[in-house]
Image (tube, grey):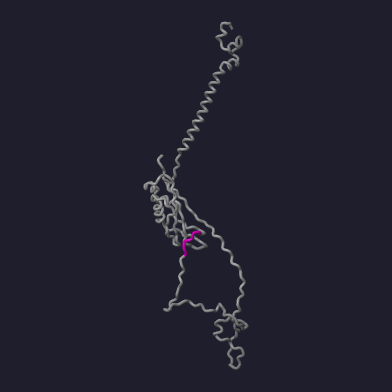
Amino acid sequence: MKSNNILQSELIDIIFDGRNKDYGAYELRNNYSKRIRNALLVTGVIVGGLIGSSVLANSSRGQLVTRDTNDGVILTEITEKLVEPPLPEPEKVKVEEPQVKSEIFTAPKILDDDKVINPPPAMEDLDSARIDVVKRDGVPDPGLTEVKTPVDNKGILEVKHTVEEGPRITVDLDAKFNGNWRQYLERHLVPDVPVNNGAAPGRYSVEVKFVVDVEGHVSDIVALTKHGFGMEEEAIRVIRKSAKWDPAVFEGRMVKAYRRQLITFVVEGDE
């Protein structure tokens, strides 16, 4: 290389002056800065894309609005299974039974009065005595005592009516709607009731208690919450219109029992 061209030449050209520049080392060193620039550019684009995707994902997650598929009403069935504590077993007390009065059984025979040795007991004695092979004194036989039925002055039997049992809280088998209970509520409840009455956005859980008697009739419907905006009234209206139920079962018999139903109204705000 001429001396007047040294100051105008690149360092790489000075190093490879007079050498084979077609060799790969010259090409690698000559384009080194270009490759570094391109690598930094690609790395910056990838990192920027990852950061942008993360920011967009976080912002969209914060604005996500959950919608219920049942158009504003969520049904939750409440089952009460309170286990009653077992009653303590009564202490076994040995009670000695009193001696029961008995009369000797005498086979009837027709004899003259002067030949009777063991006369049969009188009918009054047999009314309260047990027949035995020996005669004993004691208390009247309880199995032969007369049971007196109360009779009023007009000669009419007095019949005692049992008091109807009140609704039970705990049962062996809850009362069951004769059909699809959830489907019935979803078809007849009006989810726009709280919206039409000016309720603020939010979730309102309405709890209703009612009684199903032994004939399957629904009665004594009471709302246990007081959210207002017509929600309690709407829940009571739909439950009152329900058809007959299968009554609850306790100890193998049908009984009157309480049922509870939770209905959640969802009022969505402006998106």
* Left or right for 218, reference 20: left
Q: In the image, residue 100 lies at what x, y percent? A: 59, 79
- For image coordinates 62% across by 90% down, the residue present is 117
Residue sitting nearer the eye, 254 or 206: 206
Quarter-of-image position of residue 104 = bottom right
The vertical placement of 184 against 117, above or below, is: above
Q: Decide whether residue 1 is among the magenta residues.
A: no
Q: Which residues are magenta?
A: 165-170
User: In the figure, 104 relative to 188: above or below?
Assistant: below
Residue 169 among those drawn in magenta: yes
Q: Residue furthest left?
A: 196
**Residue 7 falls in which quadrant of the image?**
top right
When asked about the image quadrant of residue 14, the answer is top right
| In-front residue for pair 171/114 | 171
Image point 54% across, 85% down: which residue? Answer: 124
Rendered-image quadrant of the N terminus: top right
Reply above or below: 94 against 83: below
Measured as percent of width and height from the top left, residue 173 is found at: 50, 58
Q: How many marks?
A: 0
The one nearer the camera, 133 or 270, is: 270
Which quadrant does the C terminus fall into? Answer: top left
Q: Residue at x 44, y 62 (%)?
A: 215
Task: Return the x and y of residue 172 as percentages of the image width and height.
Answer: 52, 59
Q: Main secondary structure of the magenta part?
A: loop
Residue 232 image position (x, y, % from top left): 41, 52
